[in-house]
Image: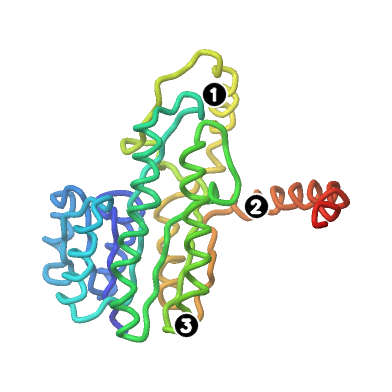
Amino acid sequence: MTKAILITGASRGFGKLWAEAFLKRGDKVIATARNTSALDDLVKKYGDNILPLQLDVTNREAAFTVVQKAAQHFGALDVVINNAGYGLFGTIEETTEAEARSQVEANVFGLLWVTQAALPIMRKQGHGHIIQVSSVLGIATLPMLGMYNASKFAVEGLSETLASEVKEFGINITLVEPNGSAPDFAGTSAIHSQPIAAYDNVKAAVQEGMKDESSFGKPEATVDAILKLVDATNPPLRLFLGKVALPWAKQVYTERLAEWESWAEVATAAHG
């Protein structure tokens, strides 16, 4: 069945790949971007099946206007994919106030505004699926990406809560958690903080770990997974993308559980 799908951050990367995959199979796509000229090739190829709309997701009023226009244009809003966002590279100490605020504005508040705009439409319809593009870095962390990690941890908590609030309305929520991909968000959209030399060793270790190209997935390989997710009658709350994410998450949670257990006596005594 043809779906009306809104994708934010559709000018490049996952957003554009997924937008074209939906268009190829006949879905209607509302593709948002800060610069819609990046979508001209899709408009030329798919005509009226794509509606390109300019949107800076950090503008709450604009987000509500665009989502309402999207639903009116195609008569429904079946799926929203919150894909817009970027990565901020730098240690916690290196991160400026402006950089930290901008990271959260884009990755958390931008996602929140689009989600809030879509919910009343989906409640009225009695169905809908909101897909939040999180990251394995919303489950585990890496040095040099502290504010990005924090933004994705926030998206995880927000979305898990939301899922419990809207299930009765026929609305499903899914957190998509990709591992790194090549080329990934470290490319042209990334922001880098002013370096402090004291952290050179940490940065060198991270860069050394990134030399293993086999740990980075191919963005185009995610297409089939997203199509299956959108078509699922009972979609999962969380879906990893890539072969690295799940083993890493298992390792992280094994270590967390072991540490919690080792302090269990102290924790229980703190109950009173």
Name the residue beneath numbered marker 3.
Answer: 233
Give the mark count.
Answer: 3
Give the vertical position of 34 relative to 64 (above or below).
above
User: Furthest-right residue in view?
Assistant: 265
- Callout 2: SS: helix
Q: Is residue 89 left or right of residue 82?
A: right
State the image coordinates of residue 54 (x, y, percent, origin top left): 16, 55
State if disc 1 and disc 2 touch (CB < 8 Å): no
Q: Earlier in the sequence, mark 2 or mark 1?
A: 1
- Find numbered disc 3 in the image and state the secondary structure of the residue it sits on: loop
Q: CA distance from mark 2 to mark 1?
A: 22 Å
* Amino acid type shown at disc 1: Lys
- Give the residue type at disc 3: Thr
How far from the left and from the top, in percent, is residue 267? 81, 51
Q: Which residue is mark 2?
A: 249
How busy is the neighbourhood of tag 3: few (under 14 within 10 Å), some, or many (20 plus)? few
Q: Assign a secondary structure to mark 1.
A: helix
Q: Measuring from the top left, give residue 42's x and y in whole percent.
A: 18, 59
According to the picture, the residue beneath numbered tag 1 turns out to be: 203
Which mark is first along the chain, 2 or 3?
3
Residue positioned 27% across, 55% down in the render: 10
Determine which of the numbered discs, if any, sits on residue 109 in the image. none
Q: Residue at x 45, y 49 (%)?
A: 218
